[in-house]
Image (spheres, helix red, strand yellow):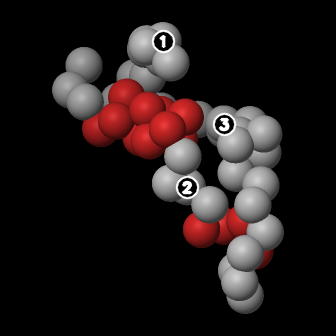
Amino acid sequence: MSEMYNLRPAVIYNIEASQFISKIDGVSGAHNDIGGPEIAHLIWQAALPV
């Protein structure tokens, strides 16, 4: 999971992450299933400066 995504500023990305965001829980379904390490890694990659 140390892959660098090379995300660029001011670009909108459509990420297919249904493999990792899939736990149906509560009223909002899987929309809150973002606590896994794969999604955290993606969020950090997007937040880090280029």
Question: Element type at marker 2?
Answer: loop
Above or below: residue 15 compared with residue 35: above
Going by the numbered disc 2, the residue's amino acid type is Ile
Q: Residue at x 70, y 43 (%)?
A: 20
Q: Earlier in the sequence, mark 2 or mark 3?
A: 3
Q: Residue at x 77, y 55 (%)?
A: 22
Going by the numbered disc 1, the residue's amino acid type is Glu
Q: Residue at label 2?
A: 34
x and y, in percent, of residue 48 in the image: 25, 30
Above or below: residue 13 compared with residue 1: below
Disc 1 to disc 3, C-alpha distance: 15 Å
x and y, in percent, of residue 40 in the image: 44, 41
In this orientation, does residue 33 appear?
A: yes
Q: Residue at label 3?
A: 15
x and y, in percent, of residue 14 in the image: 66, 38
Depth check, mark 1 against mark 3: the one in front is: 1
Taking the image as shown, residue 26 lies to the left or right of residue 34, namely: right
Question: Element type at marker 3?
Answer: loop
Above or below: residue 11 compared with residue 6: below
Taking the image as shown, residue 19 lies to the left or right of residue 38, namely: right
In this orientation, does residue 10 appear?
A: no
Taking the image as shown, residue 23 lies to the left or right of residue 1, namely: right
Q: Residue at label 1?
A: 3
Above or below: residue 14 compared with residue 50: below
Q: Earlier in the sequence, mark 1 or mark 3?
A: 1
